[in-house]
Amino acid sequence: MSALKGKHILLAVSGGIAAYKIPFLVRLLRTEDMDVRVVITNSAQQFVSPLTLASLSGNPVEHDLVLKDSGNISWNSHVDLAGWADVIVVAPATSNTIGKYVNGICDNLLLATILSSKCKVFWAPAMDLDMFDNPANQMNLEKLRAFGHIVFPSPSGYLASGLTGPGRMVELDLIVLRIRSHFLKRKYWQNKNVVITSGPTRELIDPVRFISNGSTGRTGLELVKVLSDYGAMVTWIHGPSRYHQSGLDGVTYRPVTSAMEMRDEAMAIWPKSHIFIGAAAVSDYRPKNVAKEKIKKENAAMESIKFELNPDILTEIGRNRLEGQYVLGFALETENGLKNARSKLTSKSADAIVLNFTDTNNATMDSENNTVSIITSKNIDSWPIQSKKSIASNLVYWMEHNWKI
Ligand code: C5P
């Protein structure tokens, strides 16, 4: 069951071309089990059908301030609609609707509802680039922020006018992620700086070849997503991985390739952090010399590649910890799992090691599920097989309950 089940989302749709995307947004929110209602302006109905939105949300679409039904006239209460909403998302937010709202103009149900609301309001402006740049709009967006509302960025890209520039409506998945983190934030993680390494590293042999490993970086991504949802400030130092999510709230992205780059990034940020999570599969060795040109087949250089040891990032982090900083490491073992993980706990000065022991659970680096044990100096906690997403959320919960920061 989604932790967001039953949250009330009021989508306020004003009349921009990006309104054609809103049915997909309704679907995404419904997938998370949220209750969705839609309020729409006159002009928005020219871009998207209210019937589509009503069918997908499972609720009638609200439009009229005054309802006329079989000869009866009644007032459609914008106060009730505003009171129902846990959050309001205005998407797309047009220049017209934003401009009216910041001036308290209330000539339709959508504006009356937002003006009557007490909940958080998220705005997803969508305009052509020159309109977006216009000082009137920039000033109005600044006013929305000053009112305590959240204004999504309007990224650059292809616009309906055929021009290219800023003013596009923010991507739908980022709207959903931001709503998630609004609801899921937890006190413990507020103002906590977390550094996480994830994915494999690549150690160059020549300009086109490298040594690496099969780590997908999936557990790392899931950890970053949960931490972002809970409101942590995350520095995500990630090696090359096909599992990625940009634009996560509170996340600073530090893409790296080699172990040396990963180490430098980690050591630079560690003194200002509370928790280090070493989920990366760092290459233990790197070629001593990187050939300047691609090594030719007929050249014997491949046979005589010399390797040197990479720094052990977790060990350096552990040795340079300050009072009150906590360190979580990972261990992937194929034999003597427990014994090796225990010795890593000490040699790497970690507070806990998450052991993946491939012998017992058949889990490979690229599998959906995994079985892990959490090893501390006092305890071994073995968890049943579960998805990497679930492991990430349980690990974050585990840290919250075991580390008093
Ligand atoms: O020694 P081993 O590679 O098994 O240890 C695994 C743990 O150490 C993981 O947390 C991994 O991210 C970290 N590690 C590291 N730097 C290395 C090798 C491993 O931080 N060079």
Image (cartoon, rainbow, N blue to C red):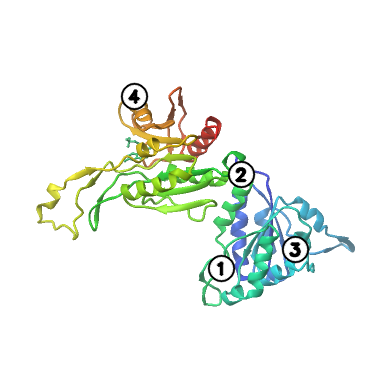
The extreme top residue here reads: 378
Circle 4 crowding by C-alpha within 10 Å: few under 14, some 14–19, many from 20: few
Give how far across and how far down residue 253 sits, in percent.
45, 53
Name the kind of residue labelled 2 in the image. Leu
Q: Are marks 1 and 4 in contact (CB under 8 Å)?
A: no
Residue drawn at x 51%, y 34% is: 399
Circle 2 crowding by C-alpha within 10 Å: few under 14, some 14–19, many from 20: some
Name the kind of residue labelled 3 in the image. Leu
Q: Where is mark 2, residue-wise? A: 184
Residue drawn at x 44%, y 40% is: 276
Instruction: Residue 113: give its label.
Output: none
Q: Where is mark 1, residue-wise? A: 168
- Label 1 near ligand 1 (CB < 8 Å): no
Residue drawn at x 62%, y 76% is: 134
Q: Are marks 1 and 3 in contact (CB under 8 Å)?
A: no
Q: Mark 3 or mark 4, which has the lower sequence index?
A: 3
Give how far across and how far down residue 8 sits, in percent.
70, 49
